[in-house]
Amino acid sequence: MARKRNNRRITRGLRFRLTASYALFFALLLIAVAGLLRQGLSSLLDNQMHDVLDQEWAAMKGYLRIEKDGPHWYYDEHDPDETYIVERLRRVYLLTNADGKVIERSTAYQNIGIDPPADIQQNVRVALASFAPGAAGKTYWTERRDAQGAPYLIRAGIVFDEGHHAPYYVAIGIALTNNANILREFTWFYLGVIPASLLLGLLFGWFMAGRALEPVLAVAQAAQRISGSNLSLRIPTRQANDELDYLILTFNRMIERLEASFQQMKQFSGDVSHELRTPITAIRGQLEVALFTAKTTDQYRDAMVNALQDIDRLSQIVRALLLLSQAESGQLTLQKSRLNLSEVVQDLVDQFQIPAEAEGVRLRAEVPRECPAEVDRMQIERMITNLLSNAVKFTPEGGEVRVKLHSLGDSAEIVVEDTGRGIPREYLPHIFDRFYRVPGSGTAPGPDQGLGLGLSFVAWIVKAHQGVIDVESTPGKGTRFLIRLPVGDVRARNLEMAAQPIMNEL
Ligand code: ADP
């Protein structure tokens, strides 16, 4: 129950964070869009105002004539349209001579402030300098505010009197109050829309995040049902082929691996107790029999010798198990040294000659003179010993065991092959498992029987040296183990080895 709540809290937390980041992004987007829209609208309105004022300027030039006695506006006073246009043109209007002396001005223009004569003189000078017949002269655009803060767009430039003798400075303007109002209204409208859309977005985000996380919750709940006792349970995929299905698949694969090692552990502890029980039962039996039936010292001695043999086997098992668990938990580290593998192999083959002869098995070695390698001597000896003792043990009289060594530069190849009874194909995958003995392998249970641990050691030693092991076997014909071990940078070592005698002489 508590776990379920915990799960909920996690997905809630995730849902909240997803929604919050989505809402934050959405809000920032809305604000950015608002800024862009406002900017766009403002420049659109601005352009429009410039166009309008350009038209007004053209109209002004059509109506205004500056004659010797001063400026005159020529229009039909009886035409209400023309009267209206001229009145509009003169609403924000200034006319000065080239020195900046005011000839005519409207009240509105007075309100926004008459340009200082020095500015006018300067503007007229620049406009005259850039003036070309037939082309529009230089125009000046400014934006100003009147005393009440109302904005105006002003267009100024020069016009000539009739006969083109003297330049005059004219400025006409247009109120931008409307534009400002439009922009303000737009801004308020948009600001009003933002919270509403944000709220909608939040609700939508919350809903979508909830929907997206629903399967996660389902997976978590399914995962909770899996425990040590029902590792066979799997979470069904949703066939959506999405990230979540991938997660489920990965999770299922993990459970599969867990199940396999769990099974292996169970099997192992079963095997260990079985292996230990057999000699213990035997010891107990022998001692009980001796206690109740033995009469002579020799009978007692026999019972004790037998018991001791079983105890030896027990300690052998315990020692081997301890070593294996140390090896597998990484406590046993390799003690690598530089050596000549040929010598090691040859020595071991020599040691095995006597037991091989006793079994009636021929033992031959094919090793090169030199095979330099950087390996753990003790472990490599243990590995070859295990392989050799198996080969001799499982080869009938008259058979042959061959050990071959090849130096391949940066690796060495060791082959142990026999003409023994071989291992049926179906048992091959298990021979490296702990306590595994091929069924019906013949060796009667008892002190002579193998522990089924020899090849587990071989596999670990090969793995610890980053090598590979391969086995081929034909029942009735023989078995061949092939091991390839990396041997370190032997070229450097060869040089060193070659240099050694010289060094010694020195
Ligand atoms: P054991 O201590 O029983 O030899 P191993 O782990 O060394 O245990 O070997 C596991 C099993 O593999 C052996 O019991 C045997 O059945 C089989 N086996 C190993 N080597 C050979 C071989 N050269 N020929 C036939 N069978 C073999």
Image (cartoon, grey):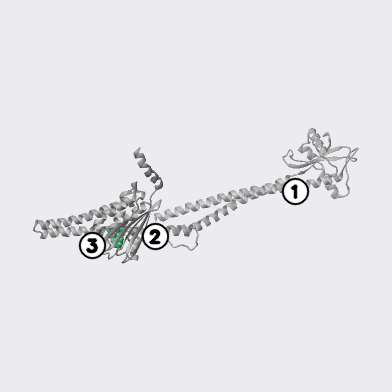
From the image, tell me which residue sits under label 1.
48
Taking depth in this image into account, of 322 and 452 the one nearest to the observer is 452
Asked whether, in this view, residue 26 is left or right of residue 89, the answer is left
- Sequence-wise, the earlier of marks 3 and 2 is 2
SS state under label 3: loop
Taking depth in this image into account, of 133 and 428 the one nearest to the observer is 428
SS state under label 2: helix
Q: Residue furthest left?
A: 295
Q: Residue furthest top?
A: 118
Quarter-wise, where is residue 173 in the image? top right
Q: Which mark is residue 445?
A: 3
Q: Which label sits in the foreground, 3 or 2?
A: 3
Location of the C terminus by quadrant is: top left
Q: Which label sits in the foreground, 2 or 1?
A: 2
- Sequence-wise, the earlier of marks 1 and 3 is 1
Taking depth in this image into account, of 325 and 17 the one nearest to the observer is 325
From the image, tell me which residue sits under label 2.
256
Quarter-wise, where is residue 406 in the image? bottom left
Location of the N terminus by quadrant is: bottom left
Quarter-wise, where is residue 204 in the image? bottom right
Q: Which label sits in the foreground, 1 or 3?
A: 3
| Percent x, y of residue 369 | 34, 51
